[in-house]
Image (cartoon, rainbow, N blue to C red):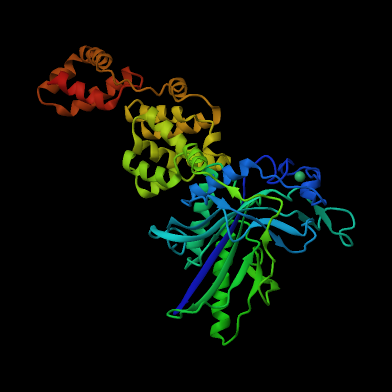
Amino acid sequence: MNGWETIIGLEIHAQLSTESKIFCGCSTRFGDEPNANTCPVCLGLPGALPVLNRRVVELGARAALALGLHVNSQSIFSRKNYFYPDLPKGYQISQYDKPFSANGELEIMTADRDEAGHPVEWRAKKIAITRLHLEEDAGKNVHEGLPDVDRYSYIDLNRAGTPLAEIVTEPDFRSSWEAYDYVNHVRRALQWVGASEADMEKGNLRCEANVSVRKIGDEKFGTKVELKNLNSVRFMQRAIEFEITRQIGVLEAGGRLHQETRLWDERAGETRVMRSKEEAHDYRYFPEPDLPPLNVSAEFVAGVRAAMPELPEARRRRFMEQYGLSFSDASQLTSEKSLADYYEQAVEAAGDARVTANWIRSELLRELETAGLLAEESPVAPGELGALVRAINDGKISGSQGKDVLVEMFKSGKSAATIIEERGLVQVSDSGEIDALIDQVLSANEQQVKSYREGKEGLFGFFVGQVMKASKGKANPKVVNERLKAKLS
Ligand SMILES: [Zn+2]
């Protein structure tokens, strides 16, 4: 790596969470029978006319605003012409020279990672966003799981016409971890505002990376390689890392790199050539004659903005200021919207923001992770976790008792109070009640009281023991100590 610099640019395709397709009323439901959700428009039959789905514009605006981008008052749909069996029209309706949004800037938090993959030091980095545009997805060629696949390929057009937002960055990333942190930032932002499910494993967020290397100090970019088949953010990071090492290795050995597309093979842990790109495609873009220009008013954008929840970065900063949380606590608690909501409801019930943050991070998240659940699916309601934290803070039960209670709450769905009661865990802290027990013990042990008062202070432990016994172990030891001292002096 010494003396080399890495240059990475990213393209993300995010499926917008609409119920129907971008230019027709067909369902976008996943997993239906092949070609069930099709019509003349998305089959590309002659004479069929596209009509823009208003919800796509709303969600596209949400996506843009969630990434800090503006929405252009006018954008133009264009035909991107190419031939492929899963594209029945022979062109994809996309946007070209007048996209939905352009020339934005997104600030992300990023960190280098140590050997074990832990973040070293978080810092802010600005990424230039070239464009965010709206387009339709193509269909799918199916080569597996059907009869005679050795002789036939099948085409499923259910996905044809599904709305996508394509987000393209400038080549601003200098390491695989910066790319990793960016994609996670975008995923979380899109999920947060409900623009996209943004799940890479399900394929509703797809990512391509353009990777090249150059000698530090060089002005000119090196030959870039396009990486595809990146099915998770971690795979993408590993693929980029592999590619950096491979490219430097080729160049240092005096070899030449080729402009090509390579696929990541997770099992083999390497990238492989998919196709070489001798020259740029000529898509012969031209404005889509069947769709008018898309005009988006300032009022429309303002309405979309007003309906959006507080964004993750803003919420993280607020958590740090309002609740006095560290960056790492606040970041983790705002990693998912449902977790952030959970935390705030729990704090309200607990009355202690930092202790609640600790309990969620150390205890609750472990239980959730083991059970494979999200915060919103937790069998322990936020108010109940808050009640447990309050019981510990008030000295009703100890912290270690609290951990057992939480495990039981998680398993049984019972409230903290019920379990504390059932297990007889309640500490008696009421000084009146404890005074009565002390009086009992002292009058039953007059001889010892006399000895104590004459200087046998070692007997104090004996009295504490007797009071605790009389309370069946439920008295708060701290209060017993205080009251006993007062009574005996
Ligand atoms: Zn259709």
| Image coords of residue 287 (percent x, y) | 67, 58
Q: Residue furthest left?
A: 454
Q: Nearer the viewer, residue 432 or 277?
A: 277
| Image coords of residue 244 (percent x, y) | 54, 73
| Image coords of residue 22 (percent x, y) | 68, 46
Q: Nearer the viewer, residue 100 or 206?
A: 100
Residue at image x 71%, y 43%? Answer: 28
Q: Nearer the viewer, residue 428 or 200?
A: 200
Q: Is residue 34 above or below residue 6?
A: above
Q: Is residue 363 above or below residue 122?
A: above
Q: Is residue 267 above or below residue 13?
A: below
Residue at image x 52%, y 68%? Answer: 8
Would you say residue 34 is visible in this rendering?
no
Would you say residue 453 is visible in this rendering?
yes
Q: Nearer the viewer, residue 104 or 153?
A: 104
| Image coords of residue 415 (percent x, y) | 48, 24
Residue at image x 18%, y 29%? Answer: 458
Q: Quadrant of ligand 1?
A: top right
Where's the C terminus, which quadrant? top left
Q: Is residue 358 above or below residue 167?
A: above
Q: Is residue 270 left or right of residue 408?
A: right
Picture quadrant where residue 319 is located: top left
Q: Is residue 180 left or right of residue 263?
A: left
